[in-house]
Image: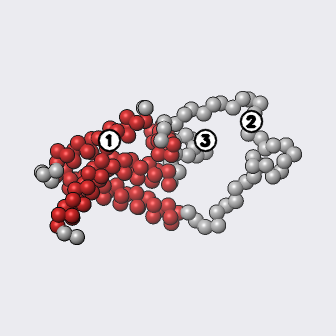
Amino acid sequence: MNARTMRQLRQIHLWFGMLFAPAILFFAFSGMLQTFDFQETVKGVAPPRWIAVIAGIHKKQDFPKPRKPRPEGAAATPAAGKPDSPASAVAPAPAHSPWPLKVFVGLMSIGLMLSTLLGITIAVTNRTSRRLSVILLATGAVLPVAMLFV
């Protein structure tokens, strides 16, 4: 490739990188929290509200909706007379440990966030592209938040 083509590719990379950097940071962070099940209720203790909110946005692209309370007569009991019903099924224990992959995904998320922050730093400290970089970065932060309310 010639020098002109490489300059154009770097410019396009800058535009896309700055526009999507806020989303990359958000999804890498929220995905890491979900990898380690921080959004799950454990032993009756609900996660902090902010974790539940970002998990809902990550998984469903919407704010989490409050669950409707169950009627008192509809307690979580297995279906009578149906031993093979899903309500009475117990999930088998995994044959392998998920932790090695979870640790890898956690490290990958941290690496992606650090790489994105490094790219933002490089783009913003470059005088020739600083204004456009800040505009694209702000647009990339505001646009998805605005879309949540549409």
Say left or right for 55 vs 117.
Answer: right
Say left or right for 112 vs 101.
Answer: left
**Of helix, strand and loop, which one carries label 3?**
loop
Residue drawn at 26 percent across, 45 percent down: 136
Disc number lying in front (2 or 1): 1
Whichever of labels 2 and 1 marks the residue nearer the N terminus, that label is 2
Q: Quadrant of residue 46?
A: top right
- Give the labeled residue for mark 1: 141
- Give the labeled residue for mark 3: 44
Q: Between marks 1 and 3, how big is the CA–CA gap? A: 35 Å
Residue drawn at 79 percent across, 44 percent down: 78
Q: Between marks 2 and 1, how big is the CA–CA gap? A: 43 Å
Identify the disc placed on residue 101: none
Q: Position of residue 111 (x, y in %)?
A: 35, 60
- Give the labeled residue for mark 2: 75
Q: Between marks 2 and 3, how big is the CA–CA gap? A: 16 Å
Residue drawn at 36 percent across, 58 percent down: 112
Q: Residues within 10 Å of mark 1 (few under 14, many from 20)?
A: some
| Residue in the foreground of this view, choosing between 41 and 2 | 2
Whichever of labels 2 and 3 marks the residue nearer the N terminus, that label is 3
Q: Residues within 10 Å of mark 2 (few under 14, many from 20)?
A: few
- Rendered position, 40 above or below 9: above
**Of helix, strand and loop, which one carries label 2?**
loop
Disc number lying in front (1 or 3): 1
**Of helix, strand and loop, which one carries label 1?**
helix
